Image (cartoon, helix red, strand yellow):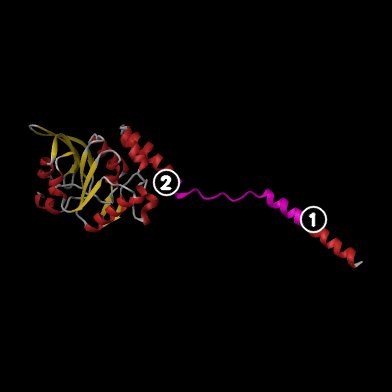
Amino acid sequence: MMIKRIIYIIGINIILFGWLQMLMGCVSEPQQAEPEEDTFMKQRQEMVERQIKARGVKDPRVLSAMLKVPRHKFIPEEYRSFAYYDSPQPIGEGQTISQPYIVALMTELIEPKEQDKVLEIGTGSGYQAAILAELVDEVYTIEIIPTLAKRAESTLKQMGYTNIHVRCGDGFQGWPEAAPFDAIIVTCAPPEIPEPLIEQLKVGGKLVIPVGEYYQELIVATKTKKGIKKKSVIPVRFVPMTGEAMKHQR
């Protein structure tokens, strides 16, 4: 009787084990979370399609650069989930990274070419410099706030950019020893266009700059042999240019 009972218990356990295996086979495995970089890539694609192309930016090289450069890596961790939103984002020290559309628009307005040397005033996070570095030969960028300049330089080096030169200093004076430049982009607003920047621009080159105090306009200034030709593009809102520019306030 004892042997029969043992055999019976073993048989029941085998049957129960079989049922358990069947039940486990019917339960689908939990889906793995999508890798973070894949999520950011999808958001970047949507950013280019909905925020940039839809607003009229057409240069395929600019669109390609906006799609390639990981904007989220230039934004502090606590704001990274908002990296691809249609708005500026804080980067510390009271400064912001510009709205994606504005970055793309300003880049397209200088008509970047592969052999160009471009000056940027207002490095900030380094994002605009990275976009430019994908499109031109050399980028010179100046940031007046030491902590931002140091952080941007570190970020850009970690990302492998070797054609970006970062300086901490007053952008009002430009970068005379590296001049002349094929184009200049300014990402902070002086009350008027700094004369040193015009002097450091090549004839035929373009300067894209927000100008104004309370009311600002994005201006494209093209240098000619006779002076500069200005064109107003759109109203904008940038952080003010500090340093020497403050002395020129009305």
Residue occupying image coordinates x 17% and y 50%: 241
Q: Which mark is residue 2?
A: none
**In the rendered image, which residue does mark 2 sit on?**
40
Q: Secondary structure at mark 1?
A: helix
Label 1: how many Cα within 10 Å (few below 14, some 14–19, many 20+): few
Percent position of residue 91, x then y: 30, 54
Percent position of residue 66, x then y: 34, 40
Gap in Å between the C-alphas at discs 1 and 2? Answer: 49 Å
Residue occupying image coordinates x 42% and y 46%: 40
* Count of numbered circles on the image: 2
Quadrant of the frame with the N terminus: bottom right
- The range drawn in magenta is 16-40
Q: Earlier in the sequence, mark 1 or mark 2?
A: 1
Q: Is residue 130 visible?
A: yes
Dominant secondary structure (helix, strand or loop) of the stretch shown in magenta? helix
Q: Nearer the viewer, residue 147 or 240?
A: 147
Label 2: how many Cα within 10 Å (few below 14, some 14–19, many 20+): some
Amino acid at dot 1: Ile
Query: Magenta segment: does it hold 212?
Result: no
Q: Quadrant of residue 128?
A: top left
Query: Magenta segment: does it hold 24?
Result: yes
Q: Is residue 187 visible?
A: no
As drawn, is 52 to the left or to the right of 219? right
Task: Please say if 79 is above or below 132.
Answer: below
Q: Secondary structure at mark 2?
A: helix
Q: Which mark is residue 15?
A: 1
Q: Are marks 1 and 2 in contact (CB under 8 Å)?
A: no
Q: Nearer the viewer, residue 151 or 51?
A: 151
Amino acid at dot 2: Phe
Percent position of residue 129, x then y: 27, 45
Farthest residue to the front: give it.
Answer: 162
